[in-house]
Structures are given as structure tokens and as C-alpha cells.
Image (cartoon, coloured by chain):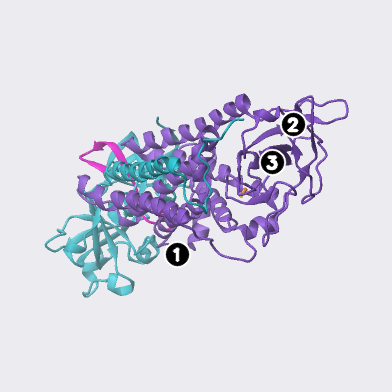
Chain colours: A cyan, B purple
Amino acid sequence: MKTDTTPFFVGYFKVPKKLRKFLLSAGILLVACLTVFGLLIGSTQDDPGNGAFRFDYGRQTVTGVIENLPYPLLHVTEGNDRIKAGETLMLAAGGKMGVMARTSGFSGQQIVASGVLLERGDLNMLQLRGGRQGLRMAEGDGTEMIWEPPVSEPLGRWRIAGEICDGKCLAGAMRPGRGLAHKACANLCLIGDIPPVFVSSQPIEGTEYLMVVDKDGGPLPKAAYDYVAQFISLEGEIERHGDILVLKMDADTIEVLP
Amino acid sequence: MSVKYIPVQWNNNKYYYDAFMLAGVVGFLWFFLHVSPEVLSHERPINPQVHNARAFGACAFLMLSIILAIGPLARLDRRFMALLYNRRHFGVMTACVAMTHAGYILNWYWAFSSSNKYEALLFSNTSFGQFAGFPFEIFGIVALICLLVLAATSHDFWLRFLGAPLWKRVHYLIYIAYISVVAHVSLGILQDQQNHVFTAIFLVSAIVVAGLHVLAVLHERKAGDPAGAVNTEGWVTVCKPDDIVEARARIAVLPNGDRVAVFRLEGKLSAISNACSHQNGPLGEGKVIRCLVTCPWHGYQYRLTDGQSPAPFTEKIPTYRLAIQDGVIMVDPDANPPGTYVEPVEIPS
Ligand code: FES
């Protein structure tokens, strides 16, 4: 009669001797593999870019003039140590909210803006404090507050390649703040009127960041949302407003690039 | 095999199993979260929420891959059967890790807006018609729901409540979960990486899981249980008595698709259903220990003569009548009701 030599495991009994070594090796292999994979995957994460909230600069308060495009730009007229007069800032509120509604009554007016700076290369954005503490009319007798926006300089029609992002995450509110895994978050920011920014794969007039508006000057067209975070090329008129380039995108010309 | 509700029936083997599993998970997370940032030369670190989410997400994927590899491995090499025992703890742990991943993601990407984060999760990206930019989060949600259902119903209470066949069918959700995770990762983070180390580990893991399943199927086809020939009275041929090893069984497939396990013990033969009443485990691959057939999956035990678990347990499985004709074991394919006594048949010397 045949006899049985295969070890038989029963959970509530002691492990048979013959199986012990095998199971111990399997357990050690499991722990070793998971640990090595943890190190391997963890240490090969992509660089999230150098954007950041600059809390280390402290609160920034500057005077400037609002230009609503419709996303607001702040042309700084009286700066401080960090932000110089003549610089142009994009604006946002806390969280995933823009400030279009708050700035709409201030077009061409001299205002005092206060908040924390977000910085990524030459992309600067000021996250305003809430209410009047973040945005108020500059004091004065009223006459000096009428301001001519700097003449926008048209730079012609371009076809450029790159990615539509939300300007705030990109500028450092999130790291990483761009790319396809971040698309839903970017959409949500854009729905909240955070200024969209096109990151060009080639610098244009010295910058890779362009604020995006619709070809007729309205906010980001609905058709653009499907292409947010994708590598695309598109056409549009580019204008310089202060030291920021603004792309009037033509949604009909979008092409997805491989 | 419990007579009253006990959350977990702990024993030393379960402690060892869980200790290795926890050591693996902690090792993965610790090295990912605390050792690797030292290696990365980023000017500014990845946000902790995203870093944590990635660590827990990758960990959940690997855990799920390991869980799914155990089944086919056990079919290919019986020694792995020991890892099937307590696998549900692995599953519950995986659901917890996956849930943590989802929590970090949800409370980061969908927080800070004026919308409710759960609603925002559903409306923020609706580009369903495209590959790049597809709302891959949806696959993550499907996988997470599956894992939570599996974890919630993993206790034997649910097994009894739903009955083994339905419970097993529900637990095939693990495959939907895995396929969803593969889609979630493929359309998500894999579309958004410059460094492809994770891509390689992901692909190899998924291919190993799929490959092991294919190998196990091929192995079953080659070495699977034979369908017994039927004689004129409708009884089914199993094998010769000497083909059966002492305290072990041979399995035969009956014309109706059920399996019978014929055991040999101290010169006598008995036939019982091959399906364990717990989770349909293959009793015929079990062993007789102290006169009781012991299931190889979780150790439920049955008497050979009547298919009943010894008191105080109450489980019962069907028995079969058998006979030896011309030196060959024949089984009546009509099963007796569970718990029916059948006198063991002596093997003629
Ligand atoms: S299937 Fe669980 S003990 Fe048999």
C-alpha cells in the first residue's frame, strides 16, 4: 500500500516540520519583496517642480491696478522688497477659488492687495486674504485712481505646444500641480475661476507660462476642459499685459499630440 | 467551525501569518515614505498627501496581486495551500490600505473647493470619450467598493448567512476589483510618469498574476480530476483501491458535474462529497487525521462514515454508496442526504 509523505497543513495545528522551512522562506520573501519595492517605487518618483507657497516671505501687501481679462491681473504700482513696482501678478482666493467676482468692480482702479505669494519660476500669483483685508480701494482723494491700463502689446498669432493647467496648483499650491493624474483637480480649480495657465514646451518671449482666455477675451471655453492636462497644440493670439503673456486660445485649433 | 459568533478564532499560525503580512506592509510604507525621500534629489518635496496616497495605492496594488497569486500557486504546488489559510486577513488589510489611499486622494484633490467633495469627484472630470485624460478615478471607486464588500462579508457569519455558493460568487468580485485597479493605474498614474520603474513593477505583477492563473488552468486540465466511466447500472468508476494512499482520497467527477472523494482508512473505503460545507474547499485533497477528514483550506473536519462534523459542530456533507466490482471502486452517483450513515466497504485482501 502506498504511504503518504506530503506534509499536510492544518491551520489550528502545529505546522508540519517539512513545511516550516518553506513557509518561513515564503514569509521572508514577502517582507523582503515588499520592502524593496517600497524603496524602489518611492525613490523613483518624478520631481514635482519647484512651485511653492512662499509663506517664508511673510504676508505681502502691495498697491496696484486691476485689469480684468476677465481673470484679474494686478499691475503693481507700489511694491515692496519682494514684489517690485511694474510686476504683474495673477490673483486667486484661498482654496480652489478665483477672485473674478471680487475684482469685477475694481477694473482700472488702484487697490491694495494683501496675501501670500505663490511662485514657480517667473510665474507669480497672489492668494488674497479674505474680504477687505485681501482687497480694498487704495486711499486717496479719488483723482489719482483713474488709471490707464498699460497698452497691451499684440505679439501675433501663434501655434504652440504644451499643457493647459490651473494656474494655482501649477504655481505651487500642489506639488505635483499638473499632469494627467491631477486633471480632475485642475478642472475643479478652473471651474472655480482660478486663472488657467498654458505651459508651453518652448519658451515664448522668454517665458513658458501664458495666462489663457477665450479667443473673444472671455473665460476658458468649455471645449478646453477635455484637453486640460493633455499635451496639445493650439493656435491663438498672444498679447503682453505688463510682464505676463496672455493667450487668446482658439479652441477649434486644438490638436492632441502624442 | 464555530458554534457561536466569534470575531476571529485566533491561533498561532494566524498570528504568524498576520505578523509577516504586517511586516511586509510596514516595510513597504516605511521605505516608501521615510527612506526614499532621502534618495530623491527634488528641489521641493512632493506634497505629503500625494506622497502618502501613492505609497498606500502602490502597496494596495501589490497586496492585491499577492492575494490573487496565492490561489493558482496553491493549485500548482500544494505547499502554498497553507497560505490560503487566513488569506481573508490579507484581504481585509488590503481594503484598509486601499481606503487610506482613497482618503488621502479625496481629501486633497477634491477638498478646498466650494463644492461637496463627493459630488466634485463625480463632476470634475467628465471626459469619458477619450483615453488620455479619462476620469480614471471611476475605476478606483469600483475597485474600492468591491474590496469593501469583500472585507465586510469576509467573516464566516456572512458565509453562513449567504450560503457557500452565493458567498463564493460574491467573492469573485476580487477579479473585478483587480481588473478595475489595473485600469485605474493604467489610465491614471502610468499616463503621468517620466520614470518608469513603477510601470515595470506594475506590468510584471499584473502579468505574473494573469500568467499564474493560465498555468493553473492548464495544470488542472492535465492533472485535474478524471471523469469516471459509467457502468450499465449507472454507477461510476473511480479507481483501484490500491491507487489510494492511506488516509487520503481520490476524486472523481460524476456525470452531473459534482465531485466525489473516496477515502481509504485502515483497509476500508468511504465516499463523501468533495465539497466542504464551509467554502466548497476540495475535501478530497484533505487528509484523515484522527479518523476525521480534514479540509485542506481551513481545517473543517467530517466523519468518514456519515459526513458529519463531530459534536459540538453541526456541519454535514452528502455521503455516497460505494462498492468494489472486479477490483475497481464504483460509486453510486446519487448522493445520500447530508449526514447519512454509510458502512465503510472493506478492501478484499
Ligand atoms: S473550505 Fe474552509 S474548511 Fe473547507
Identify the subunit bearing mark 1.
B
Q: Is residue A230 visible?
A: no
Which stretch is magenta?
Answer: A188-208
Identify the amino acid type marked 2. Answer: Pro
Return the residue at label 3: B274
Quick check: B197 left or right of B147? left
Return the residue at label 1: B114
Q: Which residue is at the front of the view, B188 or A136?
A: B188
Question: Sequence order check: which comes first, mark 1 or mark 3?
Answer: 1
> Alpha-carbon distance for marks 1 and 3?
59 Å
Identify the subunit bearing mark 3.
B
Quick check: A175 left or right of A101? left
Q: Is residue A197 magenta?
A: yes
Identify the amino acid type marked 1. Answer: Ser
Q: Quadrant of residue A18?
A: top left
Q: How many C-alpha atoms fall within 10 Å of the one at disc 2: few (<14), some, or many (≥20)?
A: few
Return the residue at label 2: B348
